[in-house]
Image (cartoon, rainbow, N blue to C red):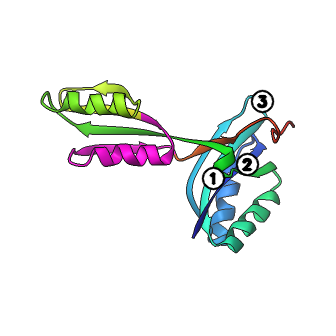
Amino acid sequence: MNKKVIQLLVDNTSGVLSRISNLFSRRGYNIESITAGVTADPRFTRITIVTSGDNTVLEQIEKQVEKLVDVRNVKVLEPDSSVYRELCLVKVACDSTNRNDIMLFAENIFHGKIVDVTTKSIVVEVTGKQTTIEAFLNMLDGYEILELARTGITGLSRGYEDVVVL
């Protein structure tokens, strides 16, 4: 199974995300993560999809998505010519004996932010590559993770050459 990061530029219209996810569902394609947000131009939404399958399936996904009416541009974000990021919020059980340890490695090693602290828990925000998020979560081994939320990958290609202007 190969992974592919596909970025779509779509019309910012009602139901567009539903139509895209329905296409994946109808065809039995897998979505590992999907993020969507309006662009600098409010007429358009940028959607980043991480999907997996063999090469034939991945090619079919691209072709099928390109056929959708609301889709203006489809771009594969290659790892060596793109920037990927993911946001992770983690709520960890802690008390006065281990709170500082969590804060130190979150902030100093992973450049995380402490976004909430109570007497029984701490919420840490970490942003970075998927490998950074995984490494941070591995560092929490031995601590009790109460809740975890990940956004999935979002990304942009590097440079100016393939910027799409509509």
Q: Quadrant of residue 136?
A: top left
Q: Which residue is mark 2?
A: 8
Residue at point 43%, 40% (across, down) = 88
Residue 30 placement, left or right of 157 = left
Q: Residues within 10 Å of mark 2 (few under 14, many from 20)?
A: many
Mark drawn on residue 49: 1
Residue type marked 2? Leu
Mark 3 vs mark 1, CA separation in Å: 20 Å
Query: At which x and y percent is residue 64?
Result: 77, 64
Judged from the image, the secondary structure of the residue bearing numbered disc 2 is strand
Question: Tag 1's secondary structure?
Answer: strand
Question: Where is residue 145 shown, x and y percent of the image?
Answer: 27, 45
In the rendered structure, which segment of residues is drawn in magenta? 126-151
Amino acid tagged 3? Asp
Residue underneath mark 3: 41
Query: Closer to the camera, 104 or 75?
Result: 104
Residue 141 placement (x, y as % from top left): 25, 49
In the image shown, does 94 or 3 lie closer to the viewer?
3
Is residue 136 placed above or below 108 in the rendered structure? below
Please give left or right for residue 150 compared with residue 45 in the image: left
Query: Which residue is found at the position 65% from the left and 49% from the top?
Result: 80
Mark identifier at residue 23: none
Q: Are marks 2 and 1 in contact (CB under 8 Å)?
A: yes
Determine if the magenta segment contains residue 129.
yes
Q: Label 1 is placed on what type of residue?
A: Ile
Task: Categorize mark 3 by other alpha carbons within 10 Å: few (<14), some (14-19), many (20+).
Answer: few
- The reply, left or right, for residue 82 in relation to residue 94 is right
In the rendered image, the quadrant that contains the C terminus is top right
| Furthest residue toward front | 80
